[in-house]
Image: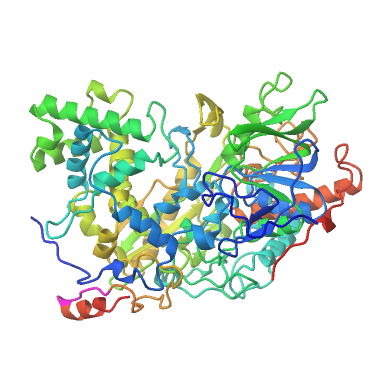
Amino acid sequence: MMQLHAGATAVSDDPLHAPRACDGRAPDVFRPGGWVPMRQYRESEPVDFAIVGTGAGGGTLACKLAEYGFSVVAFDAGPYFRPLEDFASDESEQTKLYWTDDRIVDGDNPLQLGSNNSGKAVGGSTVHFAMVSLRFRPEWFKSRSMLGYGADWPLDWHEMWSYYAEIEQALKIAGPVTYPWGPPRPRYPYRAHPLNGAARALAKGCEALGIKWTETPLATLSAPRGLARPCVYRGFCVTGCSTNAKQSALVTWIPRAIAAGAEIRDLAMVGRVEVESSGLVSGVHYHRDGRWRFQRARNVVVAGYAIETPRLLLNSATARFPNGLANSSGLVGKNLMTQSNQAVWGRLEQEVRSYKGPPSLAITEHWNYEDRGKDFFGGYSYMSQGPLPQLWANTLFNARGLWGNSLVEAMKDYNHVVGLKIVGEMLPQESNRVTLSEEVDQYGLRIPRITYSWCDNDKRLIDHSLKFMRRALEAVNATDIWIQDDDTCHLNGTARMGSDARSSVVDADCRSWDIPNLWICDGSVFPTVGGANPSLTIQAIACRTADRIRALARRGELEAGSARPSIHRCSIEVQRL
Amino acid sequence: MHERRDRYPGYDVLAKWSGPSWNDKTRDVITRRLSIAPEPRFFTRDEYETVVAIADRIVPQPAVRPPVPIAALVDRKLAEQIMDGFRRPGVPRDGEAWRRGLKALNAESAAAYDKRFAELPEALQDKLLRAAQSGELKAAEWGGLRCEVFFKHRLGRDIVLAYYAHPTAWSEIGWGGPASPRGYVRLDLDERDPWEAAEAKDGNDATARRSNRGVR
């Protein structure tokens, strides 16, 4: 039985500058100032799994592996927040949730990073994601053989369908009774959220153009759940939920992981994966509390998302693996895929006030499931939008070129703005990639260079979507319609999964082809991205990976010492009412 | 001067300060922001003077109310090293990019008009900023920093974000502002909660003013 530190106050209250998860306890995300007991592991004793990253991939996997009885330490470079006390209703303040370490961007279409494609906190970018929780279209898992583009996943969609159902239950996704597209799925666990003005405009536009729409399946509560209360429609979702309605990894998988005996190390930046002379990995070097440390591990899982994952693998190069770890295919860092995120904006005579409620309450996946009439491969969904003032002002400045009085006057129409924005599929290209720059960051680690250029197919998809969404806004009598043509969202690829070691980095189980105790479990493993937000699929893959690891362990096919889960489940008792 | 009709007459987002839409953390953050003095910590005096002049053109403010200290807000962000975290090759990190861009802009101003940027009349300031926006400025002081990249991704971005981080700007555009824990109830088109700003319509300011006076 571990010691509880009731009443201890020695820990700094500033989660950005001193780790909170230490001394046998971790922050209780459900209670201001609260703590939960947390098991801790010695650095010198190998744990079954060291997981780098605690977002949709790493956080989910940490939970599942711990619940299956493995010993787990999960590292995150970012702080460990208690949303109820640490999150302000403020866009500027909440940029503390983003990964803003130094990075170089180039190519024909340099990416904008930070806000909508990164996270630096326990829970990763799920702490500030828009909660859109979509299943992939089944054919996307075999896009090369069934649709003629991209690359096939080594996974069967029927199996993924069952994992999607597991995640939807685990997060109590709020969604419609019947979903208009794709094969039948169970009804969503919680009822759909009501439409706001922006979502109503999307719905009317779809109906005018004769296509289907639905309430967006969202990972935010529409009814109470345990200690979390339902969404209050405050509208700050993408800057962090201060009421815990959002079902982020921080308030779902991570508390479960800790209750099952996992340890979380916050403000812990992993800089290198160690490889032994045997060719197996033996642990991770990480920076915490002002110095470099080493955690021994029987298995290492890299789950740092599509930039930090290849960066860590490349930065871990050794004499034996001079091109980085898991890179015999030469594909680590390649096939980076963002998603197109273009918008059409307009003005309604009615008051829209799209700042209320989750930003994307209504969606159409019509062009994900309809292939007729396309002059491009892939698909896109489009959703209603709810930009907060800073984001909206910078959109008018950056994308529309407004400044001076024209900007100030346009901003006064904020409450009448209506917009539709796509999440569009971009094709994998090896030339879109993450490499290492010669410059180093605050940890002394070489920083990533991210190179991105759209291909002709990407541009045709964008053109199609912009023409269609313009018609949708015209159909609801929007005026002053204009196009934002340069935005992107989400990052995937850079360590793709496949069925052949020569053309992929990991197998279907997220296990690297080159090093059998090195795994990759995040959006990096996606061979293609589809026209849907990736978080549900990342979590589904993490759950599948956990099941596969358990099965492999039972068969004795994991590396030495981890053939069976360590027995520790009875060593912790969670104090929760 | 152009017309600056008040779209949300009498609406002050700060009237909700002690109400259920503002939590302690938000009050802490906004208290700090409102206490920022209009003087430089990161910029030199000369640089700061230039930023003040630029901010006046990017986001002009009415003379009838206390101005939002845009330059100071940008300055504090840079002093606290809050950065975007991505940059193009040849572009320095945020603070250094500002210094180089300001130096280049003043060099352009001196070469064309023999004055510092801040000393130029507004029309010439706008002309220089438009030239920066469209990539026409090529003085040696820019170095590897392209003027249109600096204008779009650093100068304008930081100034616009600074202004619209201030409660004065929130009131101006009729935004609900901080909203935790109360949130909102009436979400649909043309629906408004009593704690949201009422818009003056058809020149009828009185009705909106009365409603906005009751916002808590």
Residue sitting at x 41%, y 62%: A386
Q: Residue A170: x, y in percent?
A: 69, 64
Relative to the observer, which residue lies in front, A193 or B30?
A: B30
Q: Which residues are magenta?
A: B198-205
Side of A219 where A105 appears, left or right: left
Q: How many marks?
A: 0
Q: Residue B148: x, y in percent?
A: 28, 35
Q: Does residue B213 sit above or below A295 in this rendering?
A: below
Residue A300 is covered by the magenta coloring: no
Q: Does residue A275 sit above or below A358 in this rendering?
A: above
Asked which colour scheme the image uses, the reply is rainbow
Residue that sits furthest to the right in the current view: A555
Q: If the image is split into quadrants, where does the N terminus of chain A sit?
A: bottom right
Side of A324 where A366 appears, left or right: left
Residue B100: quarter of image: top left
Whether residue A417 is visible to the viewer of this picture, yes or no, is yes
Relative to the observer, which residue lies in front, A180 or A308?
A: A308
Residue B204 is covered by the magenta coloring: yes
Whether residue A387 is visible to the viewer of this picture, yes or no, is no
Q: Residue A302: x, y in percent?
A: 68, 40
Residue sitting at x 17%, y 57%: B66
Main secondary-structure element of the magenta-colored stretch = loop
Q: If the image is split into quadrants, where does the C terminus of chain A sit?
A: bottom right
Relative to the observer, which residue lies in front, B178 or A326?
A: B178
